Amino acid sequence: MPIDGKPVKGRGAEEQVRNRFLRQQYGVVHWEGIDVPDDPHQVTRFIETFPKTIVNQVRSPDLPFARSMNPYQGCEHGCSYCYARPTHEYWGYSAGLDFEQIVLVKRNAPELLVRTLQAPSWRPEPIMIAGATDPYQPVERKEGLTRKLLQVLSAHRHPAGVITKNALILRDVDLLGEMAELGLVSVAISLTTMNEDLRRKMEPRTSTTVQRLRAIRTLADAGIPVRAMIAPVIPALNDKEIPALLEAAAEAGARAAGYTVLRVNGAVKDVFVRWLRTHLPDRAAKVIAQTSMAHGGSLADARSGRRMRGEGAFAENIADVFRIFSQRYFQRRFMPELDRSRFQRPTGGQLDLFN
């Protein structure tokens, strides 16, 4: 149940949902005489981890990249629909509040990336920075791991992409601009709604849409190719905003756009449905029904080739609207292919870059 029967301020999840791998679960108990913070769910914990690798192979036919890396696990942005929430279960945490308030920090990520690029067998296929959690979530202001990863990639002329919904990316416009001049980088900015009240509820710790559009404009003005991702499109919630979002993105300078239709697999279903019924009770049943109809009768969908776009009447309508307005606003625009030919393999001593 939600804490004290109320939504948790500044969080997307309302509770700790059950971890499928654990027999025993835990939560916060208010016990008379025990001194606890006024609101323990406002506190975010950052835990350093020590992975042995940082670059992941991506084998999904639904994704346009083959490699990804995430300097953080878990995300303070708190998006109620986030598909990455179940990854926290592998660490023994909940996909609910834990995903937002326990962020795992991979401080050795830049060193691991250098060692990866040093391998004689390495080939410079583009690496997507993101894929599980946002590389520019609030903790990046302090840790700077995403910037350090970009410094490695820039120093060795390695192609990369970045996905974010945070205007903090503008801090790194200098590095991104240098890489863009060599054809080494592209950026995707996620846009979900022009309704600020809905944005605050659905993505509580993200940048506003106005800030994201400003980020698109600033990046585009710096010569950095930007794609707008209208994602996720949620039937009966933000699907009617597709034309306005595409128009705003094009006016800001985006070169292309893409979209996905909401699906909520595993524990994400419990988080999203609870959020929906708490914040938008008048629309909850309609959103659930139309989203389920786009995925064969279920909110979840693991079918390759269909899960990202859905099927049926509602999914087809979304596809048609997106196609028509993309043609209107993005005619004769395109995202350039990233240059793989400039790669310079690191030699010994390259870890001095971080000293």
Image (spheres, grey):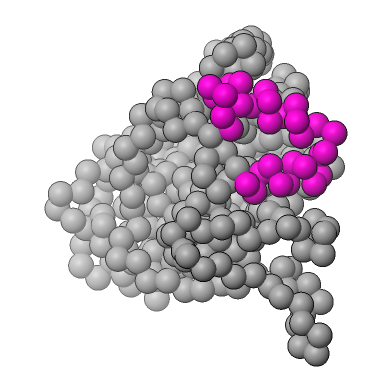
Q: Is residue 292 magenta?
A: yes
The answer to whether residue 257 is visible is no
Q: Magenta segment: does it hold 274? A: yes
Front one among 92 and 203: 92
For image coordinates 76% across by 88% down, the residue present is 34
The residue positioned 40% from the left and 27% from the top of the image is 304
Residues shaded magenta = 270-299
- On screen, residue 8 above or below 291: below
| Residue 299 location, quadrant | top right
**Residue 275 drawn at (x, y percent):** 73, 46
Name the spot of residue 271 as percent of width and height, x first: 64, 48
Picture coordinates of residue 344 (x, y %)? 25, 50
Say which residue appears at 40% left-offset and 40% top-offset.
184
- Whether residue 6 sits left or right of residue 288 in the image: it is right
Q: Residue at x 44, y 33 (%)?
A: 302
Q: Is residue 347 left or right of residue 192?
A: left
Depth check, front residue: 340 or 131: 131
Query: What secondary structure prevails in the magenta region?
Result: helix
